[in-house]
Image (cartoon, grey):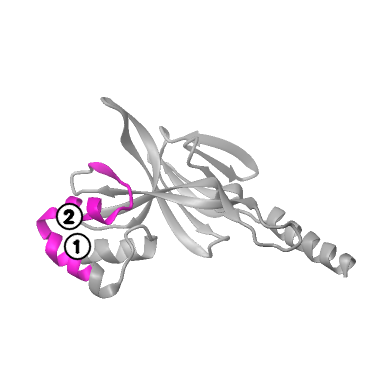
Amino acid sequence: MRIRFFFVLFIAVLGLSAQQFSSEVFHEGFMVTTDKDTIKGDLKYDLDANILTVINKGRTKSFSSHKVFYFEIFDKILNNYRQFYSIPYTVNVDYKIPVFFELVYEGKLSLLTREHIVSQTVNSSSAYWGGGTTSRLVIKYSYYFMDSEGHITFFNGKKKELLAFMAKKQSEVKKFIKENKLDTDEMADLVRITAFYNSI
């Protein structure tokens, strides 16, 4: 029984160690530079460092967000196409730098995200370990809204802030959220809310 337990544990640990996140691997895609050149190849992004690495014709080259206008990949982890733009964003009171944002929904009001790999602590109720906590790596998303003039506002995921941000149509949005039982910190639900807001 003990041997079987350790074998199962080994497989579980192996599965965790083999876990890959989209930012850790290369994906087929293309990029457009600020000089309007299009480069196809295998792309790997680093949103924390705002660096895009491209393998093209056997050569590897890295580009900072200052040199990239847009890139698109077919994410082989998520099995989906994803689009990213380099957009000036205020990092201090009066200082802007180009930052990579993923475009999740495009409209008069667009929804953007940035992802981060973070360590999450979870409770363990294993009888073998006597309970306690363990840590695992997960993807956490930060959300941003961009208006038709290109102004970007960070969104903290709270319903109160969302309704304040959509103040002109607050009553309709509030009713839509309630009737459809939507969560303002879930990406799929936030896309639905943004699409609804743009439609009214």
- Between 90 and 41, the residue placed more toward the observer is 90
In the image, what residue occupies the spot 55% across and 55% down? 28
Q: Is residue 39 left or right of residue 7?
A: left
Query: At 31% across and 35% down in the image, what residue appears?
Result: 88
User: Could you tell me what secondary structure mostly forms the magenta stretch?
Assistant: helix
Disc 1 versus disc 2: distance between alpha carbons?
A: 8 Å
Q: Report the residue at 23% width, 53% height from top.
A: 160
- Which region of the structure is painted magenta? 151-176
Indicate the secondary structure of the residue bearing disc 2. loop
Q: Residue at x 27, y 26 (%)?
A: 93
Q: Is residue 69 above or below residue 184?
A: above
Question: Can you say which quadrant of the picture contains the N terminus?
Answer: bottom right
Q: Are marks 1 and 2 in contact (CB under 8 Å)?
A: yes
Percent coordinates x, y for residue 168 in the rendering: 10, 56
Q: Is residue 22 left or right of residue 65?
A: right
Question: Hey, what amino acid is under mark 1?
Answer: Tyr
Q: Which residue is mark 1?
A: 197
In the picture, the quarter occupied by the C terminus is: bottom left
Residue 104: x %, y % from top left:
36, 57
Tell whether 157 sits left or right of 167: right
Is residue 173 magenta-colored? Answer: yes
- Indicate which disc, 1 or 2, sits on the residue closer to the N terminus: 2
Read off the residue under disc 2: 166
Q: Residue furthest front?
A: 130
Q: Please tell me which residue lies in front, 85 or 127.
A: 127
Q: Amino acid at mark 2?
A: Met
